[in-house]
Image (cartoon, rainbow, N blue to C red):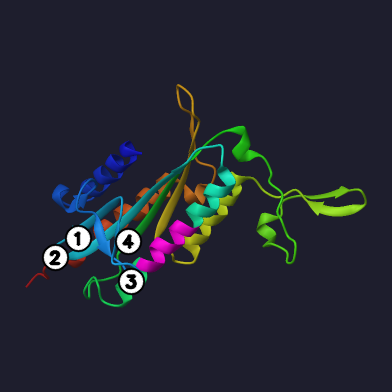
């Protein structure tokens, strides 16, 4: 994960931000609303302006189910706390910052296996149902895999403006590691373009107008 932090920092610097403005190791705390502060994984503060904050998260087996729920709650909670603090003026009057989410998921058979839903009272969102199957005269659904559930989570985090941009990367736990990106709309290429675009827009906004 450290290598990805360095890669993102390099992208931001290549887009024009100063290296000293991109923080990845120390002084990563930002104020919240429901808590005093939170330590992010990468932040950019330039001339007193919060430009960017990022989360780098990963998941390996075997407890994909429990950890998926934990990661969902963390992602929503962290973003909600920051955006509410932003609304309340904790970051001054600067334009809305970029909030990024990078997720690294272990690529293994278990994470690609369909998982049945538990619906004792109400049906889950159809996106989580999977394929329709018939068993003992009953119509059931196979459920979708944990990797597909992560896709839904991360895609909706962006669509609902919880995060500005996000990417999902899968890697095998072997040597050499095989890297894949299961969803084009969550590819690192698109994520990088959004990062660069925000950096360039910020740099353009702080330049003094020509006389």
Label 1 belongs to which residue?
203
Per the model, the C-alpha gap separating discs 2 and 3 is 31 Å
Task: Identify the element where label 2 is drawn.
Answer: loop
Question: Label 4 belongs to which residue?
Answer: 98
| Residue 51 in the image: above or below residue 89 | above
Residue drawn at 24 percent across, 47 percent down = 24
Q: In the picture provided, is 80 more to the left or to the right than 95?
A: right
> How far separated are the C-alphas under marks 4 and 1?
13 Å
Mark nearer the N terminus (1 vs 3): 3
- In 3D space, how far apart are the residues under numbered discs 4 and 2 (Cα atoms)? 19 Å
Q: Residues in magenta? A: 73-81
If the image is split into quadrants, where does the N terminus sit?
top left
| x, y percent for residue 186 | 48, 50
The circle drawn on residue 207 is: 2
> Marks 3 and 4, Cα distance to the nearest angstrom?
18 Å
Marks 2, 3: nearer the viewer: 3
Q: Kindly tell me whether residue 154 is visible in this rendering.
A: no
Residue 29 in which image quadrant = bottom left
- Which mark is on residue 33? 3
Location of the C terminus by quadrant is: bottom left
Image x and y of residue 89, in percent: 26, 76
- The reply to whether discs 2 and 3 touch (Cβ–Cβ < 8 Å) is no
User: Which class describes the residues within 10 Å of circle 4: few (<14), some (14-19), or many (20+)?
Assistant: some
Crowd around label 1: few <14 · some 14–19 · many ≥20 (10 Å): some
Looking at the rendered image, the disc whose residue lies closer to the viewer, 3 or 4, is 3
């Amino acid at each position: 994960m450290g290598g990805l932090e360095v890669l993102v920092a390099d992208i931001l610097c290549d887009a024009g931000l100063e290296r000293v403005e991109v923080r990845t190791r120390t002084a990563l705390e930002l104020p919240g609303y429901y808590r005093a502060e939170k330590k992010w994984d990468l932040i950019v503060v330039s001339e007193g302006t919060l430009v960017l904050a990022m989360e780098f998260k990963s998941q390996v087996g075997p407890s994909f189910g429990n950890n998926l729920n934990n990661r969902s709650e963390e992602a929503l909670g962290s973003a909600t706390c920051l955006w509410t603090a932003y609304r309340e003026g904790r970051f001054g009057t600067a334009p809305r910052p970029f909030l990024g989410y990078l997720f690294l998921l272990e690529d293994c058979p278990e994470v690609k296996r369909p998982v049945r839903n538990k619906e004792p009272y109400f049906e889950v969102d159809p996106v989580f149902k999977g394929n329709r199957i018939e068993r003992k005269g009953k119509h059931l659904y196979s459920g979708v895999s944990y990797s597909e559930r992560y896709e839904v989570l991360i895609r909706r985090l962006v669509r609902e403006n919880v995060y500005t941009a996000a990417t999902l990367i899968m890697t095998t736990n072997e040597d050499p590691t095989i890297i894949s990106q299961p969803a084009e709309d969550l590819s690192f290429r698109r994520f990088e373009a959004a990062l660069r675009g925000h950096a360039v827009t910020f740099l353009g906004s702080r330049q003094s107008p020509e006389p």
